[in-house]
Image: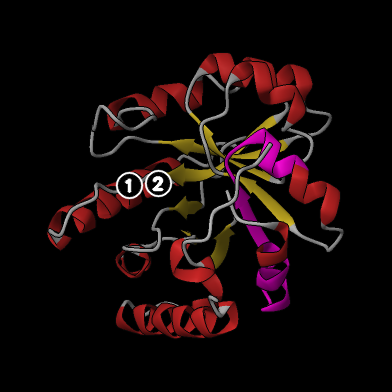
């Protein structure tokens, strides 16, 4: 049985060390426990360990957790969101990490009952297997969001390639940081873009060293247990 508290203690130590190395305050970094495909019982264990930010990537999994968990949780939707499923998700989550097309923005505008905090997803590594905008397309995309009163771009999100080459991973994260700073410097009212969602179980320390403010940690925290969500 995975001991979530022990895992979190180790992760917290690693976060603190990464912040020390990069001269950052650990309070700047929020750990999102990725509870997708994890049982309600394991998710409750995560909450008991002190985590208050949970990440889901399927409407079915999100609904199951929402029905069972009544704690004061911030819910993050971290997967690709199909436009036809926006109405079943958008008003139940606090932050969407995967805004990457205007058709999705259209549907959020139509379905959201209040302004929704969103990360624009960027495919920095330009891998065909990944969703997200190219680095070059991000600024124009954000400019095109001006007419959407229900969307607030709080930052940028990316996933690094799965590779043993740390320099490749670091370059992806540092490039996104530069773009985030550029957009934040424009002081766009609907796109403050002060946050960076990047880093997962295998590379969150590098991400923090390169400026991540949200890290999405699944296996390293909750273990490899998976359940079928119906």
Which tag is nearer the camera, tag 2 or tag 1? 1
Q: Quadrant of residue 70?
A: bottom right
Please name whichever residue, 228 or 25, is drawn nearer the observer in this view of the structure: 228
Q: Could you tell me which secondary element the residue under label 1 belongs to?
A: helix
Please name whichever residue, 217 or 207, is drawn nearer the observer in this view of the structure: 217
Location of residue 166 in the rendering, given as x and y in whole percent from the top left corner: 16, 62
Q: Residue at x 81, y 33 (%)?
A: 114
Give the extent of the magenta segment.
43-63
Is residue 29 at all visible to an observer of this figure?
Answer: no
Q: Quadrant of residue 42?
A: bottom right
At label 1, counting other C-alpha atoms closer than 10 Å, the crowd grade (few under 14, some 14-19, many 20 or more) is: many
Please name whichever residue, 175 or 218, is drawn nearer the observer in this view of the structure: 218
Q: Could you say which disc has been placed on residue 180 in the image?
A: 2
Q: Residue at x 82, y 57 (%)?
A: 69
Q: Quadrant of residue 138?
A: top left
The relative height of residue 116 versus residue 65 in the rendered view (above or below) is above
Q: Quadrant of the C terminus?
A: top right
Proximity of marks 2 and 1: CB atoms separated by less than 8 Å: yes
Is residue 83 at all visible to an observer of this figure?
Answer: yes
The relative height of residue 125 versus residue 129 in the rendered view (above or below) is below
Location of residue 140 in the rendering, given as x and y in whole percent from the top left corner: 41, 22
Q: Which residue is mark 1?
A: 176
Q: Could you say which disc has been placed on residue 38 in the image?
A: none
């Amino acid at each position: 049985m995975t001991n979530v508290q022990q895992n979190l203690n180790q992760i917290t130590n690693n976060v603190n060390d990464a912040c020390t190395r990069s001269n950052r305050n650990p309070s700047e970094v929020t750990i999102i426990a990725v509870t997708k495909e994890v049982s309600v019982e394991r998710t409750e264990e995560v909450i008991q360990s002190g985590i208050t930010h949970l990440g889901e990537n399927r409407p079915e999994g999100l609904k199951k957790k929402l029905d069972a968990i009544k704690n004061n949780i911030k819910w993050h939707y971290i997967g690709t969101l199909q436009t036809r499923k926006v109405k079943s998700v958008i008003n139940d989550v606090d932050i969407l990490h995967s805004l990457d097309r205007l058709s999705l923005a259209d549907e959020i505008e139509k379905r959201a009952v209040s302004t929704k905090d969103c990360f624009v997803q960027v495919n920095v590594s330009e891998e065909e297997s990944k969703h997200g905008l190219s680095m070059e397309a991000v600024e124009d995309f954000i400019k095109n969001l001006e007419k959407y009163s229900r969307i607030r771009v709080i930052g940028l999100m990316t996933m690094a390639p799965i590779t043993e080459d740390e320099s490749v991973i670091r370059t992806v994260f540092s490039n996104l940081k530069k773009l985030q700073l550029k957009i934040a410097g424009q002081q766009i009212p609907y796109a403050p873009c002060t946050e960076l969602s990047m880093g997962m179980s295998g590379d969150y320390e590098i991400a923090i060293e390169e400026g991540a403010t949200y890290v999405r940690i699944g296996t390293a925290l909750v273990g490899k247990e998976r359940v079928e969500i119906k």
